[in-house]
């Protein structure tokens, strides 16, 4: 019983600090001679994987106790999604056209004659820009 009271008191402190700094709260707990545990709000865990959704609002305040390994998976997913959501990150060369914005396609004669025509078309992936950025996902910050 005392463990739950302590955990909830610590959770209140962690939640207040995370709210102030704009971060996701995560409480690391280790009681005597026990393994580490991580306490997180279930709604925050769901948002990391599926983005902002009204369906998760009823999970607010439901605490989930997870292993450190599970926490690292969540943190990795969060950092990975943040990288792809940053509109200021540098764009990479389009993998379809190699950064040229054009794709050259060789068309052979359908009748089998030894003739071919090279056709250049605008890259559909980057729309001729030569740079590609994955689309921003809604609800992930």
Image: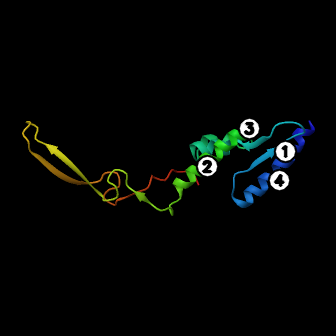
Q: Which residue is mark 2?
A: 78
Could you say which disc has been placed on residue 8 in the image? 1
Q: Earlier in the sequence, mark 3 or mark 2?
A: 3
Label 3 neighbour load within 10 Å: few <14, some 14-19, many 20+ = some
Identify which residue, 69 or 1, lies in the foreground. 69
**What's the residue at 8%, 42% (across, down)?**
114
**Residue positioned 8% across, 44% down in the render:** 115
Marked residue nearer the N-terminal end (1 or 3): 1
Residue carrying label 3: 67
Could you say whether the residue bearing mark 2 is in a helix, strand or loop?
A: helix
Element at label 1? helix
Of labels 2 and 4, earlier in sequence is 4
Residue 81 image point, x, y percent: 56, 50
Direction from residue 120 to residue 96 in the image, left or right: right
Residues under numbered marks 4 and 1 in contact, where contact means CB atoms less than 8 Å apart: no
The quadrant of the image that shows the N terminus is top right
Q: Which mark is residue 13?
A: 4
Describe residue 41's horizontal placement relative to residue 111 as left or right. Answer: right
- Residue 38 image point, x, y percent: 76, 42
Circle nearer the viewer, 4 or 3: 3
Instruction: Report the front residue among 60 and 96.
Output: 96
Disc 2 vs disc 4: which is toward the camera?
2
Distance CA(mark 1)–CA(mark 2) = 25 Å
């Amino acid at each position: 019983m005392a463990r739950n009271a302590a955990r909830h008191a610590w959770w209140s402190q962690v939640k207040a600090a995370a709210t102030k700094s704009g971060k996701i709260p995560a409480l690391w707990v280790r009681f005597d001679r026990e393994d580490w545990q991580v306490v997180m709000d279930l709604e925050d865990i769901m948002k990391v994987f599926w983005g902002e959704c009204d369906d998760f609002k009823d999970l607010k305040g439901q605490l989930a106790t997870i292993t450190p390994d599970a926490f690292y998976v969540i943190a990795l997913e969060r950092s990975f999604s943040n990288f792809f959501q940053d509109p200021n990150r540098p764009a990479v060369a389009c993998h379809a056209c190699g950064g040229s914005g054009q794709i050259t396609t060789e068309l052979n004669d359908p009748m089998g004659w030894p003739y071919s025509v090279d056709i250049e078309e605008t890259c559909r992936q980057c729309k001729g820009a030569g740079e590609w950025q994955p689309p921003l996902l809604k609800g992930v910050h």
